[in-house]
Amino acid sequence: MSLLWFLLIGLAAGWLAGQLTKGGGYGLVGDLIVGVIGAILGGVLFGLLGLKAVGLAGELIMATVGAVVLILGLRAIKRV
C-alpha cells in the first residue's frame, strides 16, 4: 500500500510541478516519472536543509518542490 501512495503522490507532484513551471506537464506517465524522481530529490533536498515532511500534505509539498527543481534543471540542461 505504501508503494501505491508513493506513486499517487508522485503523480500529483509531477502534475503540480508541470503547472507551476508553466510547462503543461509531460502526460500521465511523464508526470509520474517526474513526480517520483522529484519525491526522491525533494527528500534529499529537505534532508540537507534539515527539514522534515509530516503527513500527506507535507509529503506532497516535498515531492512537488523536488519535481519543480528537477524540471527546472532539465530545462537548463536542454538549453545548453
Image (cartoon, grey):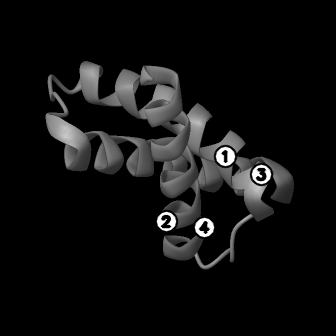
Can you say whether 27 is above or below 69 in the image? Answer: below
Vertical position of residue 74 compared to residue 18: above or below: above
Q: Which residue is mark 1?
A: 32
In which quadrant of the rendered image does the N terminus lie? top left
Q: Which residue is rendered at x = 42% and y = 42% of the image?
A: 63
Q: CA distance from mark 2 to mark 1?
A: 11 Å
Residue 57 seen in the current view: yes
Q: Identify residue type, mark 3.
A: Gly
Per the model, the C-alpha gap separating discs 4 and 3 is 10 Å
Q: Does label 4 or label 3 sit earlier along the sequence?
A: 4
Q: Are marks 2 and 4 in contact (CB under 8 Å)?
A: yes
Mark 4 vs 3: CB contact within 8 A: no
To which residue does mark 4 refer?
A: 18
Residue 70 lies, in percent from the top left, at 59, 44
Q: CA distance from mark 2 to mark 4?
A: 5 Å
Q: CA distance from mark 3 to mark 2?
A: 12 Å
If you read the primary sequence from the N terminus, does the residue marked by circle 3 or circle 2 appear first?
Answer: 2
Q: Which residue is under mark 2? A: 16
**Percent position of residue 41, x then y:** 49, 29
**Is residue 74 shown left or right of residue 47?**
right
